[in-house]
Amino acid sequence: MTVMTSPKVSTISESIQSVLEDTAEWQRQESLLITRALQKAILSSANFSSIATDAKGVIQIFNVGAEAMLGYAPADVLNKITPVDISDPHELVARAKALSIELETPIAPGFEALVFKASRGIEDIYELTYIRKDGSRFPAVVSVTALHDDQDVIIGYLLIGTDNTARKQIEAEQRVLGQRLRDHQFYTRSLFEANIDALMTTDPAGIITDVNKQMELLTGCTRDELIGAPFKNSFTDPGRAEDAIMLALTKRKVTNYELTARDRDGKETVVSYNATTFYDRDRRLQGVFAAARDITELKLAEKKILELALHDSLT
């Protein structure tokens, strides 16, 4: 039995098909417009260089960012040179050698070294030195992508680069500042260790935060053992030692405060405790800086003087 389609149904079906085709075409055109807008934005951006090559590496696209960074006009490079000609040759040799070891295959120190990973579908971002038309140089970070046709055959490469000069300068300044800080710390530490007195710092709660070698000798404990321990634990009278910290915190300065230190073997040493508070650059209290000088011989001398004076008064 033959099913008859009414002209009205056929017309509706054709209308729907037409609408679908129009919609698909509109979407395709919109997609093309977006793609072209993105391409235009890339080519007209002065924030990064965009260099596209053919499969052999000859430059086919050289955007305004590349012009600004490298000083070449498109006419200087298009269909004439490869990215190798604007790259540091010594770095290319080093890169080829490093990649040969990494990927366990011989890689030539030319254009192949720049795109080898990308040609194998491996994400590749690296640093190298670009050479401007005037011969000056600057560090760049380069991202490389292989370009394929509809059959997935590589037809070229896209190298997007950014000028890395500012970051390199910041890194160099940080290295200089870091070295200055290390030198300052070494100098400060040398002064700290060269002192003949036992030196220590504590936080406001009286917990030791640093000591010098003389403090280690006075207590018979290592620096690691002392840091984090209460200051008062190193003395025969912990209460009096704790009072010494409180005096420093309230008066900001303590002089000739007598304490008796006891080392881990029980040896006792009479010391003259002198301390002051210290602050950070914002004047926030950080703790107490203290010095303990061995006055054992002085005490013995005072004792002998008293004994002699007493003897003389009795004779």
Image: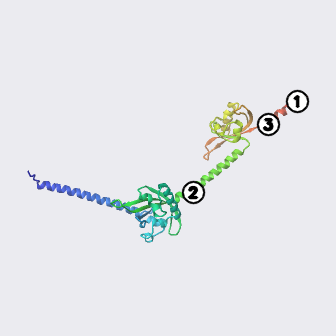
Crowd around label 3: few <14 · some 14–19 · many ≥20 (10 Å): few
- Please state which amino acid type lies under the numbered disc 3: Glu
Percent of width and height locating residue 250: 66, 37
Residue 164: tell me if it is visible.
no
Tag of residue 297: 3
Percent of width and height locating residue 197: 73, 41
- Please state which amino acid type lies under the numbered disc 1: His
Which mark lies nearer to you, 1 or 2?
2
Report, in whole angstroms, how far the alpha carbon at label 2 lies from the one at label 3: 53 Å
In this rendered view, identify the residue nearer to me: 45 or 4.
4
Q: Name the residue: 52% across, 65% down.
A: 89
Position of 159 with respect to 180 (left or right) is: left
In this rendered view, identify the residue nearer to me: 258 or 127.
127
Going from the N terminus, do you reach mark 1 or mark 3 first? 3
Name the element at disc 1. helix
Tag of residue 172: 2
Choose top left, top right, bottom left or bottom right for residue 41: bottom left
Residue at label 1? 311
Percent of width and height locating residue 264: 69, 33
Percent of width and height locating residue 45: 42, 62
Going from the N terminus, do you reach mark 1 or mark 2 first? 2
